[in-house]
Amino acid sequence: MDNFKLENFIKADDNINAQDTDLCICINSDGFYFSLIDNSYNLKALGEFKTDLSCGITSVMSKMKNCFNSIDIRLFNFNNIRVIIQASKNVFVPYKLYDNTKTKEYIRSVALLNGSDAVLESVSEKLDAVLVFATKMYQHSGIKILMPKAKFVPQHQVMAEYGFDISKLSSNTAVLYKRGKSFDLIVFKGMQFTFSNSFDYVTESDMVYHILFAFDQLNIDTSEITLLITGDEFSAQEKQILSKYIKDVSFANPMESIRVGCEFDGIDLQKYFLTLVK
């Protein structure tokens, strides 16, 4: 009996050379979604699976393998494999100040840890920083055994690196990634990375309150910042209240550096933002 559900799968063509293609997977609370992008920056495939990954290491491996087998991906010999973790337990440390003997101390400043948390770190050359983050051991270990080449990064790093590129064109820039009733916020003052945090909210007013409070603490006027929104679909009320309080609100463009064929017309590519940013 299958223990997964294929929610969506679109492939541009059947001629995918794995050794010239990057696989990017984003793990969320009830499954994962992924993209395949070749070395010429052509989007080759997008897909999403619903499956429970809150289980043991062996079970995680089996479920991931069965999901990909169902769409005829049986060997993970891709050029690069990137696994994005949607975790709010993370902290940026300037590269020159980073001490790899203190990784757990860094993360304890923002979150409680338990025995199932694995503490990892990822270097961001664009930000000249190390992002220390924690994820559940069973997910991380199961996927790493199945895909030994995989590099793990949290969504905050993907957002911050995207924001860094965009900040070259704007005086102040914020990137807001929505995931259910939570969101992640990255802020740049000019080209200076200044803020990274995650928030839960119930109403649209809660969402805008957290954003405005962050801007106020950073001494940023709402008329002097570009807010780029992405991730899960925003309701009409959410978009309306954001535009009411913030002058410049627009959707992020994860397709800026990749070629997207007509096969993907009608797909909400914002949902796949984290796996499309290069």
Image (cartoon, grey):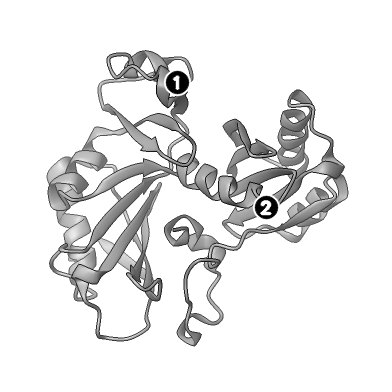
Up-down relation of residue 74 to residue 101 (above or below): below
Residue 84 vs residue 81: left or right? Answer: right
Which numbered disc, 2 or 1, marks the residue closer to the eye?
A: 2
Identify the element where label 2 is drawn: strand
**Crowding near the residue tagged with mark 1, few <14, some 14–19, many ≥20 C-alpha atoms within 10 Å:** some
Estimate the x, y position of residue 156 in percent, counting from the top left. Answer: 49, 40
Tell me if residue 199 can be seen: yes
* Three-letter amino acid code at the position of disc 2: Leu
Quadrant for the N terminus, please.
bottom left
Residue 145 vs residue 24: left or right? Answer: left
* Residue at x 15% of width, y 63% of height: 77
Q: Which residue does the numbered mark 2 point to in the structure image?
A: 228
* Residue at x 80% of width, y 52% of height: 248
- Please tell me which of labels 2 and 1 falls first in the chain: 1
* Three-letter amino acid code at the position of disc 1: Ala
Whether pointer 2 and pointer 1 mark residues with C-beta atoms closer than 8 Å, the reply is no
- Using the numbered discs, state the Cα–Cα distance from disc 2 to disc 1 in whole angstroms: 27 Å
35 or 172: nearer the eye?
A: 172
Up-down relation of residue 114 to residue 206 (above or below): above
Residue 104 vs residue 186: left or right? Answer: left
Tell me how many marks there are: 2
Estimate the x, y position of residue 206 in percent, counting from the top left. Answer: 73, 37
Q: Which residue does the numbered mark 1 point to in the structure image?
A: 111
Estimate the x, y position of residue 42 in percent, counting from the top left. Answer: 40, 75
Tell me if residue 180 can be seen: no
Up-down relation of residue 132 to residue 74 (above or below): above
